Structures are given as C-alpha cells and as structure tokens.
Amino acid sequence: MPRAILYGLCLLLIAGTGFGQSTATDSQTLQALLAEVRQLRQDLRTANVAAQRAQILIYRVQAQEGVVSRMQERIDGMRSTLGQIEHEEKRLADGIKQNEDSLEKAENPTERKEMEQMIVQLKSALEMETNSEQETQAKVTAAEEQLRVEQAKLGRLEDELDRLDKTLESSSH
C-alpha cells in the first residue's frame, strides 16, 4: 500500500508538471496569436491608408488631366483664331494692293478719291487685325507656358501614383 501511495504521489507530481508545461505552451501560443492579430490589424490599417491615398491621387490625376485638356482646347481655339486673323490680314493686304493698282490707273477724280478712302479703310482694318494678331499670339504664348506647367504637375502626380503602386506591389509580396 505505501507503494501505491508513492506511485500516486509521483503520478500527481508528473501530471502537475505536465499541466504546468501545457499552460505555458498555451500562453505562448496565445501570445503569438495575439501578436499576429495585432500585426494583421496594423497591416489592414496601412492598406486602408494606402488605398485612400491612391484614391486621392487618382482623383487628383483625373482633375489635372481635365485642366490640361481644357488648356489644350483653349490653345487650339486661339490658334484657330490666329489662322482666321492671318487669313483676314492676307485678304486685306490683297485688297489694298488691288486698290493701289486701280488707283494708279484711275483717271476720274471721284473714283480716285473713293479708292483712296477705301485704301485708308483697308489699311486701318489691317492695322487692327495686326494688333489683334499680336495680342492673340501673346495669349497663345502665355497659355502654352501655363500648359507646360500644368503638364508638369500632371507628370508629378502620375509619378507619385506610380511610386505608390510599386510600394503597394512590393508590400503585397
């Protein structure tokens, strides 16, 4: 009987140590799981922030593309206007030339006076067109410079979006 009690005590001592080790292992496992859950939560927050940042960048790129597009349309319109002005200048210069040629051939004083007045009017109109051309050309030059600035902004935004994309791609691996 004393042997049975001794075996029972040994068994209890061995079982007690086994339970103690199991509790320590369980605690370590729980700690590891808790650390992993915390890391996953942190990764999820980081991914959310990156996604929000990407959405903001995409919106900014789209808005900037709109600005660039509108500026390009404006420049195209001004260039078209320049073409019309140049055409009108040519038409007026031709009219002046024709009237000057006719003036040299005209013998009637009334006819000469009318042609001289017509030449004065045509020259005045040509001068106004020339001034309009210069103003429009200055506007085109300024708009082209502004377009280059806006295109540079768009390029920087696209570069930033590319960097964010590469960062997200590398972090997903």
Image (cartoon, grey):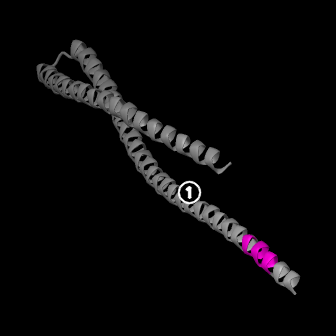
Q: In which quarter of the image is residue 117?
A: top left
The front one of 15 and 40 is 15
The front one of 150 and 122 is 150
Q: Identify which amino acid the numbered label 1 is placed on.
A: Asp
Task: Identify the residue at horizontal 72%, vertical 67% (top origin).
Answer: 21
Residue 41 in percent (x, y) is at 54, 62
Location of mark 1 (residue) = 43
The front one of 172 and 116 is 172
Quarter of the image with the N terminus in it:
bottom right
The correct choice, above or below, for 14 with respect to 85 in the image is below
Asked if the stretch drawn in magenta spans residue 16, the answer is: yes
Task: Identify the residue at horizontal 38%, vertical 45% (top origin).
Answer: 67
Residue at the outermost bottom position: 1
Numbered range of the magenta stretch: 9-17
Count of residue discs? 1
157 horizontally vs 136: left or right = right
96 horizontally vs 74: left or right = left
The correct choice, above or below, for 53 with respect to 25 in the image is above
Residue 65 in percent (x, y) is at 44, 46
Residue 40 in percent (x, y) is at 59, 61
146 horizontally vs 42: left or right = left
The correct choice, above or below, for 54 with respect to 130 in the image is below
Residue 72 in percent (x, y) is at 41, 39
Residue at the outermost front position: 2
Q: What element carries label 1?
A: helix
Asked if the stretch drawn in magenta spans residue 18, the answer is: no
The correct choice, above or below, for 95 with respect to 105 in the image is below
Dominant SS of magenta comes to helix
The front one of 121 and 20 is 20
Query: Badge 1, how many Cα within 10 Å: few under 14, some, many 20+?
Result: few
Task: Identify the residue at horizontal 59%, vertical 48% (top origin).
Answer: 168
